Amino acid sequence: LDNWREQRMSEKIRQIALSNRETMIYKHGSQPPMAIAIEENFEHLSPAWNVAMSGVEELNDEFLEETCLMHWNGPFKPWNKDNKKDYYVELWLQYGRQVDRRERQHDRLRRSVLEVENMAV
């Protein structure tokens, strides 16, 4: 983060995105402005940190142990009802339930804070 701030990356990315309105520098998505601003100033990570799940046909313990981050690219997202890969859903639900639980905890905390704030008024 220190390097990010020192190089004023957020501002550079913002300027690239704004410039694209005037002159087409890139197409599609929000990643190109960051890639343009960063150029070659990044560290390469192991491919295990961005596993494209659209190409995965079978999950096994070895695959799961070696994978750091699952990128749910392509049309089959485990949270979509039209998902055609059941093993995606099973895997997603292991973690999705944890996310749901955390969101419910955060919601309860937000409500508690609001109640306290309303009592102070």
Image (spheres, helix red, strand yellow):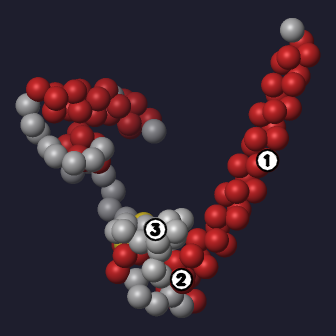
Q: CA distance from mark 2 to mark 1?
A: 28 Å
Q: Position of residue 13 (x, y in %)?
A: 28, 34
Q: Position of residue 113 (x, y in %)?
A: 82, 28
Q: CA distance from mark 3 to mark 2?
A: 11 Å
Task: Give left or right: position of 80 versus 113.
Answer: left
Task: Give left or right: position of 46 versus 70.
Answer: left
Residue name at image x 30 percent, y 52 percent: 42
Q: CA distance from mark 3 to mark 1?
A: 25 Å
| Residue 88 visible within the image | yes
Disc 3 crowd, CA 10 A, few/some/many (<14, 14-19, 20+): some
Residue marked by disc 1: 105
Asked whether 89 or 34 is in front, the reply is 89
Are the residues flagged by discs 2 and 1 in contact, CB closer than 8 Å? no
The N terminus: image quadrant: top left
The C terminus: image quadrant: top right
Residue name at image x 40 percent, y 83 percent: 56
- The amino acid pointed to by label 3 is Lys
Q: Position of residue 8 (x, y in %)?
A: 33, 28
Residue marked by disc 3: 77
Residue marked by disc 2: 86
Q: Nearer the viewer, mark 3 or mark 1?
A: 3
Residue name at image x 11 percent, y 26 percent: 22
Mark 1: secondary structure: helix
Mark 2: secondary structure: helix
Q: Earlier in the sequence, mark 3 or mark 2?
A: 3
Q: Nearer the viewer, mark 2 or mark 1?
A: 2
Task: Give left or right: position of 44 versus 25.
Answer: right
| Residue 12 visible within the image | no
